[in-house]
Structure formats: C-alpha cells, structure tokens
Image (cartoon, rainbow, N blue to C red):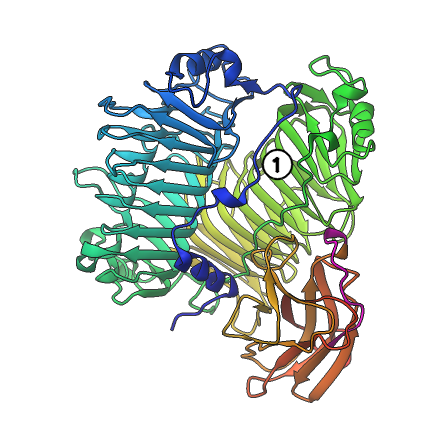
Amino acid sequence: MTVFSPQRWLFVVILCVGFLDWGSTRAEVVFPDDSGVINVTEFGAVPDDGQDDTVAIQRALDDHPSGNHIFYFPGGRYRISDTLRPARDDGVTKRNIFQGQSRNSTVLKLADNLDHDDAVIDFRSGPAQFFRNAVRDLTIDIGRGNPKASGLKFNASNQGTIADVTIRSPDGTGRVGLDLRHSDEVGPLLVRRLAVIGFEVGIWTGWQTASQTFEDISLRGQSRKGWVNEASQSVFAHRVHSVNEVPAIWNAPWELPGAGQGRFVLVDAVLQGIGKAQDTAAIRNQKATYVRNVRTPGYERALVNSQVGFRGNGSLDGHEIDEYWANGAADSRRGGPFQLFPSPDRALRLPIQDAPVPPLNRELSRWDGPHTHGGVPNDGVDDTQAIQQAIDSGATTLYLPRGTWTIDGTVTLRADLQRMMGTEAHISGRGRIRIDDGSSDAILIERLQGGGVTYVHATRRTVIFRHLLGWTYRAGIDQPGDVFVEDVVGAPVVFRRQNVWARQLDIEGDIEDRPGIEAKLVNDGGRVWILGFKTEDDGTHILTRSGGRTELLGALHVGASTQGPRFITENACFSAAVAKGGTDLVRETRQGSTLSGRIGNAGLYTAFGADQVEEIYVDNADREQVEVIGPWEPVTSAPGGFMESDFLRTKPGSKGRVVFHPQVKRAGRYEVALRWINQISSPIRYAEGVSVEIFHAGGTERVTINQRRHGGQWNRIGVFQFSPQGQAKVILHAEGAGGYVQADAVRLKPVPHSGEGAIK
C-alpha cells in the first residue's frame, strides 16, 4: 500500500500541471552599489548586443581569484564562445559565485555550431578545497549544433551550491547538463531548484569522497539517461521530477566496465515515462538505494535491482514505490532494516517542511550596512556597534559588504530586521549574534563565512541559516523556535525540544577527547529531519534522547573511523537511510535495556518501538483527509503555512467550514493543536472568534480561537481521548468568526497518562 503524505500530495499536484519552472516565482536579485559585487558589465560584457562576451567575463574572473567574490550578471543574454573558468588560487578555484539577476532574465548562451567539446562553465578539477563556490539564478544554454558540449562542470567542497538554475540544450543534444563526476572530491554541496532540459545525460554524479544533496530537481528530454550515479558516489535527493523515454535514475555502472556503483537516496519523486519508456525500468540500481514515495507512470516497471552476485532485495514491478531499500540486514543483504530492538520495518517519516519565506523587502532603501555607520572591513577593529546601528536604523536587510567584519561584542537581530546577508562577507571575532524578537515571524541569515562568532537563538521565531561556512549555534532560551539549516558547515550542535529541518549539514572535527561534547549533533527531545549529513574525524555523529525524533536521509563519514557508536538512541526515536563510512556501530537504550550492534551495509536502520506512537499531522493540502465546504481559496503568497507555506482562507461572513480527518491508528490521549500564520505577516484582518469543533472518543467539544495572535506556531486546543474505531474530526467553522478565517494544519500529539490536561 502506498501512503501519501500531505507534502507528497501537493508535490504530485504541482507536477501534474507540467514541467517545473521556479523562475517565474523568484524575485529578481539586486545588490547595492557598495556591496563589493563584481558586475561583469564593468569589464566590457554587454548583454543582448549579439557580440561575444567571453573575453570580458573571463577578465573579471581572472582579476578576482578566490576572494568570496560575487560575479554579477544583470539580466540579458550573454554570448559565450569558449569555456568560462574561475581563476586558480593555490591550485584550486574557490569562493567564486556566479550570480544572475534571475534564472529567466540572465542567460549565458554558447554560440551555435561551434562544435564545442567542453562545458560552458568549468569550475576545474583538483583536491577537496573548492570552498563556497556557487551558481545562482541564471540559465546556461549550450546553443544549437554543439553535440559534444556540456552545460556546467561544477565543483564545491563542504559548502557550495547551485540554486535556481536552468541548464538547457535547445536541440536536445549535448553530453551532460550538470557534470559532477569530472573530478573526484566534488562535494559536499547542495543543489536546489535545478532544471535540466535535453543532453545525453541530465545529471552525472560520480566518485566517492564526498556526498551531494539535491532538492527540487527537474529532468526532461534526455537521450540516454536522466541521472547517472556511479563510482560509489553518495547522492541524497528529495523531490525529483523526470519526464523521459529513457531510465530516469541509473544508480549502477555506466556502459563502460569498472565504473563502479553508487549510493542513492530518493524521496518524494515522480518519474514519468513517455514513448519508449514502456520498455524499460524507471530506476536501475546496483548498490545501495533507499527509495520512498515514488511514482513511475509510463515505465514498464518501477525498479530493477541487479546487485552483484544477486545480493539484496529484489526488483519492483508496478508504478508505485511506497518504501524500498536495496540492502537488507539479513543474509545476502536481503530482508528488512537493521534493528537492535523490535522496530517497525519503515523509516520514521517525520513531516518535511520547507523554510518559510520572510516578507523580504526588496527595496534597497530598506537595506543598511555597518559601513554607513563608521564600520570598516579588514581593519581588525570591532564592528559590533556599527552593525547594531545599521540594524536599529529600521533596516529590513542588514548587508555586510565583501570583506572581513569583526564582532567582539553582542549584535542583536531585532526590530524590523528580516535578513542578515553577507555579500559573501567574512565575520571574525569572539562575539555573539543574538537572534531576538522582531516584527517578522522568521529571520534569514545567509551567505557568510564565519569565525568564532556564536549565533544565540533567544526567540520563539523561526531562524533560517543558509550558505554558511563556519557556524556555531546555541539556544538562548529554554525552547527556541524552529530552525532550518541549509548548506551549512558548523561546529557540534545541541537542539532542545525544537523542530529542525536540515539540508546538507556538514559538522566536522574530532570530539572524542573533548569533554562536554556528547555528539556532533544532539537532539534532546525535539524533532530533527536531515537530508544529507556529512562529517569527518572521531566522535559520535548523532545522539537522540529524551523522547526526541531524528530522521536521517543519507549520511557520509569521510576519513578515519570513529571508535565509539556512530548513532546513539536513548529512549527516543531514530532512523537512518544509506549511512556510509566510519564505524557501523550503533547503540540503543529502550526501557532500561541497552544493546549495541553493527548495521553493516543495511540500507535502513530503525530504532523506535511500535508503541512509540507518532504524532499525527493533517495539512490543508491533503485532500484524502481534508473536506472543504464553502468558498475557501488556497493562499500560497504569505509565509508561515505548515506544509509548502500554503493554507486555505475564506472571507468574513462565509458559512463555510473545513473538516480535518486525522487517521488515529492507536487508542490513547492526544493533545490537539492547530496552526495558522501570524497576523503580523499579512495585511488581512484575521478572525478573533473562530469556532473549532473536536470529535473524540468521548463525544464532541467546541472551543474558540483567536487567529490574530500566536501565529506561525502550534497552538494547544486541549487533550482528548481518541480511538481507531472512532471518527476523529477537527472542524473549523467560518460562520460568525468576525474576520478572515484560516485553515492550515492540525496536529495530534500523544500524551502520556501522567501528562497535564484532563481527558475530554
């Protein structure tokens, strides 16, 4: 049976509309003139004039090697006649950011009929020192008549990204759209919102030194393979859409012998076969694979597993993959997941949430930086006061121009600030950046290289950390707000009773002989979801305790093996898919007993009991569990919604209602909570008197909620008894509410018998 989560249902709906195109939904990227950005037009590149811009762009690259430079391409079409290569520094190319104005408006186009046999952009090959490279918000076009050309040969180490990029071949030819196998030691890195159109191979990943994390990937019109992964490369992917006649995922040796096999995690995908796809499988696997919530319409079968020596679990017919792992824990790598105590034969499946989009004010008049208040980069003098003055000036974006800024005191992010952004700046010192209350529900901190500065989370509002090299995080209050960590290299971290979503998290350093540091990541009673975790050196990787829940989708340990357990679970819930490298020793404590063991090559490890009832979520997007009555409309433009940042809304005076049907599988006491967006984030006047009706095992209960307050968080309604046989329902009534009414999400959280709250 296939289980559709709320986020999967919405994703499938989006895919059914057509090939994904994020370009029309992203705001255009601009920078102040004093931000230190390198504008390629200042070196002679002129878009849309039909003249060759290659020499001018290459001059800009050569004049600024490896210095955290943003090479900015204003909107327009740039004519390219040869490969663009960032300049080398100490044998590598690092800290080079290709930045377009938007993926739709900025196009780097290879001239037609050149017979070019290389990529349009090549970040070069070499050792794993390619820090902070990035390509953002542009389109790479190989032109017509260039069948041997590729789009992008990318290289980044530890922290680097491709985001909001299209790579296309107008005539469908070309070798590789995104080439990440041209060199060993490519990664860790994060690729998000990438579309590849045409080419023999859409994405080619290979080698084994570092992992690569992907999210929101579209492939269309490849002639040989949609995505090839080989040579023991570890790839962790979430939300992939492929429309092809050829196999979509080829996690197996290429046609050439000796290429080796790869490791692949694939969650929430639609691999749509057309034409000749009816004669082949959507996924071909020959090593370690974990696949979940994947549809393969139009293909002959979903997955063929051709393990060497006929090891592992078998192939899959049909067109629906609920959950599958190639390597089990039994003999010949068959069977279910590895377990120390009896656990479900499935991953934890925590709810996956995208980071909210703060209501960023794009007007440069609301940007401010320390340099306008007396701060000077690169002089070693403390800039704390100048940075704070820029924040308190009423700015919505604090920007740090390229250079090194010193923070020895405490900078407090507060007031109207929505974003702290470095134009690839460096921060140093031993101070603190304190995240405090402010007018926005969420704050974004991005594009910085850090030193010894610590981020102190002292507010219930959400914090998004993105594209940071050097990150130290501490809780400043007992239970801070939600945290999103994306493309970040950091120090060991402890999350206490928090919701955390991480994409491409790299925590390094030997902690085995460091007192007080129990693990590189500690989940103390919270919910932590990770897509792509990489680390090096000795020490336990993840410790989950005190009822916490951790789901790990893909991990790679590089270098020497740790001596102690890699994963420790203490009276908590944990699952890990395709975790490779380092020790395979794990330890679990459950109900006073402790067991240890080695997971070996098992593709899935589960450490949670069937009696540890999971929280139940119902999002407005889940049409199988939500009944909409009356004139409710979907809203996607306001931040703060639970899944995909969307919710339902109806106008004042409506008599409509929304009925949530949570599927209770185990009788017990549950805390019912509702979520809605914050009134601060919207000019709409929301209702103060929304009637909520709860149908539970003991009857019904009606309460009134105020949606003008406490938005962007879970709000407790009460504790009720539910049973699988009962018709559990939570109904939001719009009639008589006194304003606009939201319907976003409902949560049922198990409550132990000693928990507070009377049984209703």
The furthest residue to the front? 49
Main secondary structure type of the part rendered in magenta: loop
Residue at image mark 1: 491
Residue at (80% x, 68% y) in the render: 688
| x and y percentages locating residue 725 in the rendered image | 55, 88
Residue nearest the observer in this picture, 507 or 333 = 507
Q: Find numbered disc 1 in the image and state the secondary structure of the residue it sits on.
A: loop
| x and y percentages locating residue 600 in the rendered image | 37, 52
Residue nearest the observer in this picture, 411 or 220 = 220
Residue 689 on the magenta span: yes
Residue at (28% x, 24% y) in the render: 118
Q: Which quarter of the figure has residue 13?
A: bottom left
Residue nearest the observer in this picture, 203 or 749 = 203
604 to 743, vertically: above or below:
above
Using residue 571 as the reference point, say whether residue 622 is left or right of it.
left
For the question of whether residue 434 can be seen, the reply is yes
Residue at (60% x, 29% y) in the render: 30
Q: Which quarter of the figure has residue 92?
A: top left
Instruction: State which region is magenta.
Output: 680-691
Using residue 172 as the reference point, say whether residue 388 is left or right of it.
right
